[in-house]
Amino acid sequence: MSVRSAKSQHALPRREALRVGGLSLLGLGADRLAGLRAAAPNRIQQARSCVFVFLFGGPSQIDLWDMKPAAPVEIRGDFKPVSTRVPGIQICEHLPRLAEQMDKLCLLRSMTHRMNVHGPATSEIFTGREYFAAPTTDQADPQDWPSVSAMTMRYGPTRSGFPPSVVLPWYLQFPGQSRRIAGQTGGRMGERHNALLIQGDAEKLDFQTDGFDLSGSVSLQRVRGRRDLLSGLQQAPGGRPVSASVVEEFSRHRENAYALLNNRAGQILNLDGESAKTRDRYGQSMFGQSLLMTRRLIEAGVPLVTVNWEDETKIDNTDTCWDTHKDNFSKLKDHLCPIFDQSFPTFLADLDERGLLDSTLIVAVGEFGRTPHMGQFSQSANTKKSGRDHWPSAFTALLAGGGVRGGQVYGATNHHAAMVQEKPVSPADLSATIFHHLGIDHRQHYVDEFQKLPHRLSEGRPLVDLG
């Protein structure tokens, strides 16, 4: 990190000034972070946190965690249910490790909404609000409702020098489209509130963290001195004041960079600190290594970590990730289930062993489920007889930790896993539950930048009967 003389810095263009401030292009512009200060460097936070695991594409509820073995074969499909650690609860035969962790899990089988298009449905899950327009695109729009991650970035607690909200290993985006999928940003609340993205490298199974470590020739004391020197940017050459907005934005980035460096961000975000045995235990996949990184972030005190599912099929427009319009059973059995069953149960067990599960609410869910009938058409003409189409009327979320009682089923669907019969839960209810756990008042309001109208963070009701 190099620092020029105060005189030459005054002449820097705005973009270069932000670069010199350090870490300025990492999505750290939320005004909620302007006052970040150092916590004790070795302090492990055990305050309440949340991990939101998004299973992009829409996993099949009837093939995985809400099986109907008495249904006709064209509905129940090829898989068989198996018993779990909890008597009376069964899940898919291809999730044996998850079955062993069922005493920690709540199967919330009554998620429901009405949107069957990927982007708008993703928006509804991420934001907790019904999509604002007709479902004519999957891509983000300035009118998007703000995501829970962005609202947490703005209103969540700040601990340990990290921002309140982190996303990894990528923002969801369909190949060939110019914008990320709807609902992942600050939207109409303002994109300056976007969560910090820690980007994963799928080939190296690691994360791009350049800039979080000090160089060998620069001590933390020198960084502190440079921080004071940079305060000279308050005046331009000749005594002419620099634009207040430029100074304010630069100051935010600078303070964030300083706080992250002072709190060992480079060490926390470096998986080389984990043994090969631990990395193998989580699984040699981007999803597994993302969950391992998430554990490190939770230990560091980050309130909300969003983990977006990533696998090699993310480049497939027809069957992206958990989207199974064709070859539903082979894709689940041979690809998706092995990855999930390696990593997610390991994550649950690891948090539990470290005493972090009670304080950490874990939510794993997709944007919708799959059609009860094989080959049934609901939205996509790409659906084959071997596949299942989109189905938002009834699907399952997996919850654990954070005071949620494990070994339970919450809600119920009918005999075909097609409609919710007991305790329906909306995306709004899910968002309110996350806010409630984090200690954020979901009834408070923000003013959107699009219509200048006040909106509550969530119109849902927290699920307080899960304990």
Image (spheres, helix red, strand yellow):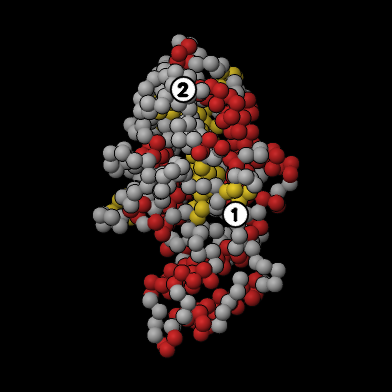
Q: Quadrant of residue 336?
A: top right
Residue at 41% from the left image edge and 59% from the top image edge = 192
Number of residue marks: 2
**Residue, x 45% and y 35% (percent of image)?**
317
Q: Is residue 86 left or right of residue 191?
A: right
- Residue 312 at what x, y percent from top left? 56, 37
**Which residue corresponds to mark 1?**
208
The percent coordinates of residue 383 (x first, y second) are 42, 24
Residue 119 location, quadrant? top left
- Estimate the spatial distance between the alpha carbons at disc 1 and disc 2, rounded to whole Å: 36 Å
Residue 149, position in %: x, y? 45, 49
Q: Does residue 109 appear in this view?
A: no
Q: In this picture, is 244 found above or below 298? A: below
Assess disc 1: are there few (<14), some (14-19) or many (≥20) residues with their C-alpha within 10 Å of its C-alpha. some
Label annotation for residue 387: 2
Q: Residue at x 58, y 77 (%)?
A: 3
Q: Looking at this view, is 218 or 316 the one in front? A: 316
Asked if residue 446 shows in the view, the reply is yes
- In the image, what residue type sits under mark 1? Gln
Task: Check disc 2 and report its element: helix, strand or loop.
Answer: loop
Give above or below for 113 relative to 9: above
The relative height of residue 388 versus residue 195 in the rendered view (above or below) is above
- Name the amino acid, label 2: Gly
Position of 423 with respect to 167 (left or right) is left
Q: Position of residue 100 (x, y in %)?
A: 63, 27
